Amino acid sequence: MSIRTRTPALTDPSAALRREPAAGTAHGLAHAKAILFGEHAVVYGSPALAVPLHGLGVQTDIRNSPGAETRIESQLFSGTAHSAPETMGPVVAGLQAALEATGGPSAEVELRIRSAIPHSRGLGSSAAVATSVARAVAALRGQVIDATALHTIVQKAETVAHGRPSGIDAWAVATPAPIRFQGGRATRIEVGRRLIFVLADSGHHGSTAEAVSGVRALHEAQPARINAAISRLAELTEGAVDEMRTGERDSIGARMLEAHSLLADIGVSTPALDALVDAATAAGACGAKLTGGGLGGCVLALADSDDQAQCLADSLRAAGAPRTWTTEVKAT
């Protein structure tokens, strides 16, 4: 997958991936993700489909710092791990879990985290940071973490970030190809035809924990209604997995529109997200939907050509998106 950005605020979305660590420093990398189908339904055991966003990445550099308290430097916070605010809880939890998994929690280190992934936009920022931290810790200690061990580490960080994470983000930000995820297991998906997506920022933070909690409360109050929505979201996901393999763009787009309608019905869309979906549809998108937890975050629109993607990006920005990115999923 490649990615092009149309936002002045993010001048080089892949810059974090090209920073060379100083001598004696190890580093770890990860990328963003977008959920194409199955958000929220995946929490109840249904399948989901996610794609990687390689051009939006995060790099963690780490070095030993004997005699000094562990420190974290990032865009959100700079200081000791002990004094880190609650918002840095997932990072601290991921670091601790990675240290424990690679030989013991006792360590005096200095982390430098640089991320081009927009925060709280449903793009897997917290999972990607935790993944890059875990890979950096392993590299510093001369180890390679296998996929299962890495997932366990990142899930500990994600639990702090989101409460009861499904696990899809932890797999998607560490896997270079689209995945189908269900019941804690991720499998790669073959792609039969190049697919072009425009990602639009609604300008509002999303809250996965709040959205999941809200759906859970609605499920307890109206189980038949929510179970029906979850069942249909699962059907849309399974059909889309098959259509990804054959490259049936129009059918995928139609599924995206229906999925957005269902997600709005269970209360995780917003007027801003709905307006962006409407703008994409009016501009000729094959389909569009929110991606991620909702209550803010981003909309994903499917274009039928590069030229149309340009038009979609312009229309989405005119409809209020402060920034857009154009991405492609290449045929395999």
Image (spheres, grey):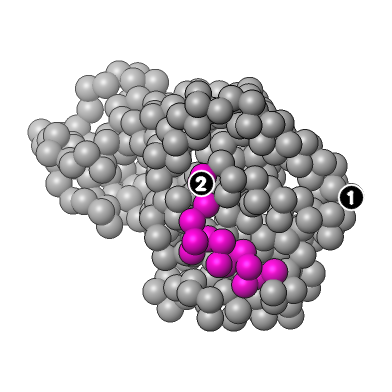
Q: Is residue 50 above or below residue 200?
A: above
Relative to 237, 50 lies left or right = left
Relative to 27, 14 lies left or right = right
Q: Residue 147, located in which quarter of the rendered image? A: top right
196 or 132: which is nearer to us?
196
Magenta stretch secondary structure, dominant:
helix
Q: Please state the horizontal and vertical placement of residue 91, each as a whole percent of the image.
A: 31, 38
Question: Which residue is identified by label 1?
Answer: 246
Report if residue 158 is visible in the image: no
Task: Tell me the crowding category of disc 1: few under 14, some 14 to 19, or many 20 or more residues within 10 angstroms, Cα based.
Answer: some
Decide which of tag 1 and tag 2 comes sooner along the chain.
Answer: 1
Q: Is residue 37 above or below residue 13?
A: above
Question: Which residue is identified by label 2?
Answer: 268
Report if residue 307 is visible in the image: yes
Quadrant position of the N terminus in the picture:
bottom right
Pair 1/2: label in front: 2
Q: Please state the horizontal and vertical placement of residue 98, each as a whole percent of the image.
A: 37, 28
95 or 243: which is nearer to us?
243
Q: Is residue 317 magenta?
A: no
Q: Residue 316, located in which quarter of the rendered image? A: bottom right
Magenta residue span: 267-281
Indicate the secondary structure of the residue bearing disc 1. helix
At x 45% / y 50%, what residue is drawn?
Answer: 295
Q: Please state the horizontal and vertical placement of residue 136, each as a whole percent of the image.
A: 39, 39
Q: Is residue 78 above or below residue 86?
A: below
Indicate the secondary structure of the residue bearing disc 2. loop
38 or 182: which is nearer to us?
38
Q: Amino acid at mark 1?
A: Thr
